[in-house]
Image (spheres, rainbow, N blue to C red):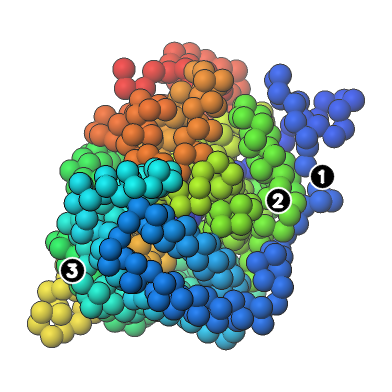
Amino acid sequence: MKREVFTGVTVLGIFLLFFVFPGCGASVEAEAGSPSGITVGEYEFEEINPDEVTTAWDDTYLFGSRGDAQEELERLKQRSVEISETFRPEFEELSGPVLLDYIETKKEFSRSFEVLYIYAYTGLSKNVNDQFFSSLLANTQDLATEHGKAVAFATVKLTSLSTEEWEQLFSEEPGLEEYRSYLEAAYVRFAEHRPEDEAQAAYLADLENQRMKLRTEAFSKITNNVTRAGNITLENGDEYAVNSQSYYTLLSTDPSRANREKCYGQRFYHLIDESDSMAVLYSEKARLDDLAARELDYKDSYEACLYRLYLKGSQVEEMNTVFKERKGVFEGCNDFRKTKLGLETLKPFDINLQLTEVPGGEYAYADALKSVQKSYAGMDPRFNGIFLEIVTGNFIDVYPDPENGKQPGGYCYGLSALQAPALIFMNYNGLISDQKALTHELGHGIHFYLMGQSVDYLYCSAPIYEMEVPSTFNEELFVDYVVENSDRDTAVAVLSQHIGEYQNYFSFQPMITEFEWKAHQLCAEKDAENGTVSGAELNALWTELYKEYRSDSIEYYAGDSAEWTYINHIYLTNNYYTFNYAVSKSITLALFKQYREDPETFNENYIAYLSAGTTMTPEEKLKKYFGIEINKQLFEDAMDVVELRILQLEELERERNGPKFESAAESLNVYSGSFWEVPVGE
């Protein structure tokens, strides 16, 4: 799903998404005599051919034409009716063979529906104003609603069965054993949070439909209104249109502080102007979120979210406490940036600027792919094979087009239904951060592909934080590759932005979720008074929370910020998405330490972990393959890594400026490859 970065970079996604940051165009040439391969250490693999790189989706393998998609919509409508008519009477005296037939029928319907939904959603992502895809997506969402009603009898029945009744079904049909974990996760586990009858199930389906429509409306408004802040006049007299793409480009590349300040201010006040309109939409969404959750006996949508993720509120509270208490760790990085830029004080429009000699330097997409590929040198060879298939097979839509309605950000949508590589949505603009977004989304793509080739379709999923592990792991691979294989100027630029990304993961992302939770409470209070929350009230709430997480050394604007208005995540039907990034990154840093210590063993476990899908619970997988638990120590260890990375950055800067000299960083062995040899949490 979409993800926002502390620096401001935005990315949006569907089942997962990403946000952005560093990366660099540094590369290592193939060895002489090996023109078609790359050799890094003892590892050799097929090198990407730039002439074979594709940059746009070819969705004809989903549907040959728009007419074909429309015909599939009508076919699925009829198929839904047939499924209901066939299985409703059979469920009155449910048997094991009948249940197996139903599950396999449901699976095939879900496959077809997913392909149609992906076609509609990705088409609309390319242009939020395309009326065909807007209508197709709305109709597909309606189909999901009507199908939910049509098979509500099955949901009600299966969530009401006792343990003894389940075991009777398994004993009657051995073929059900393959689906035991699926049935446990989809039905048995929700016995206390289920619709009581078909009428309530139908009501819940209608609520979900309304929530989906609100999400589509929000994404359209964000693209067409919220992120289009008007024009500014640059120092050279040029007019500059500030939109979702140009805003981050200027703040990342323009050495003129006056231009950056003008651009930042233009959007800052524009978002405030948009806040009342978005508050009306968000208030209605919050009402529907909590209403749907309470129908299923949850306290609110936040409790429902945690239950679905197999997490406890205490785990999230411990995480937030650690990150708030240790936010001072990032002051070392802020001081580094301030010194590097020659500033007395950092302002919010200073924290995106690339710390390269030429901040406006762009990195060609093909060069970025080469660097990403080389970062996989120590990974299982399957990484490279999947990478090549994705980047040369029309599975990535690369370049931005905001003026023609292309949404901002980036995401990855798995095609497990077709056992095909994933679709990746990008807005690649040649920045350092865009390369990081690219490897992030490719991490998702590799994960999806491994699942699709390894387990049954019904198991091709995972909780959000688990989905984000392979993407954030890819980021660590990329940064370490660049630091170890490039000049010191490049290494410093990449590592400084990467540490800034940690600040995004461990400060900004948890704060967004805390904002959602308190905004829902505020909306509920207003609704009880027959009122609607205002933009100003949400702006004040956002700013109050932001102060708890953000750096005290950066001089933010005095007025209340309306940044929440453009964050796609908070309008998702999948609520409270962003804290998953912090959980994921904490897990990733623990995994990366294991990778550096024993690559062979790690690769074996990692491939098994990524391939397993939902055949076991998230905590079981983490424990089985890596011995990791989600607790306070995991988050403390993550912040320890941040401290070590800052020491590594300082050492790289010393190397850049002259001969190395004894320092705290050197004594800890935190430069180059030896960084990950430092014990964490010991």
Q: Earlier in the sequence, mark 2 or mark 3?
A: 3
- The answer to whether 599 appears left or right of 52 in the picture is left
Mark 1 Cα-neighbour bin, 10 Å: few <14, some 14–19, many ≥20: few
| Element assignment for label 2 | helix
**Residue 49 — which label?**
1
Say if residue 219 shows up in the picture: yes
Q: Residue furthest left?
A: 529
Q: Position of residue 554 (x, y in %)?
A: 35, 51
Q: Nearer the viewer, residue 470 or 657?
A: 470
Residue 41: quadrant of the picture: top right
> What amino acid is at disc 3?
Glu
Reply above or below: 103 against 592: below
Reply above or below: 472 against 62: above
Mark 3 Cα-neighbour bin, 10 Å: few <14, some 14–19, many ≥20: some
Q: CA gap, disc 2 to disc 3?
A: 47 Å
Q: CA gap, disc 3 to disc 1?
A: 57 Å
> What amino acid is at disc 1?
Asn
Say which residue label 3 marks. 196
Q: CA gap, disc 2 to disc 1?
A: 10 Å
Q: Position of residue 20 (x, y in %)?
A: 51, 52
Q: Position of residue 78 (x, y in %)?
A: 50, 80
Q: Residue at x 23, y 78 (%)?
A: 199
Q: Nearer the viewer, residue 444 or 281?
A: 444
Say which residue label 2 marks. 391
Numbered disc total: 3
* Quadrant containing the C terminus in the rendered view: top left
Q: Nearer the viewer, residue 329 or 147?
A: 147
Q: Earlier in the sequence, mark 2 or mark 1?
A: 1
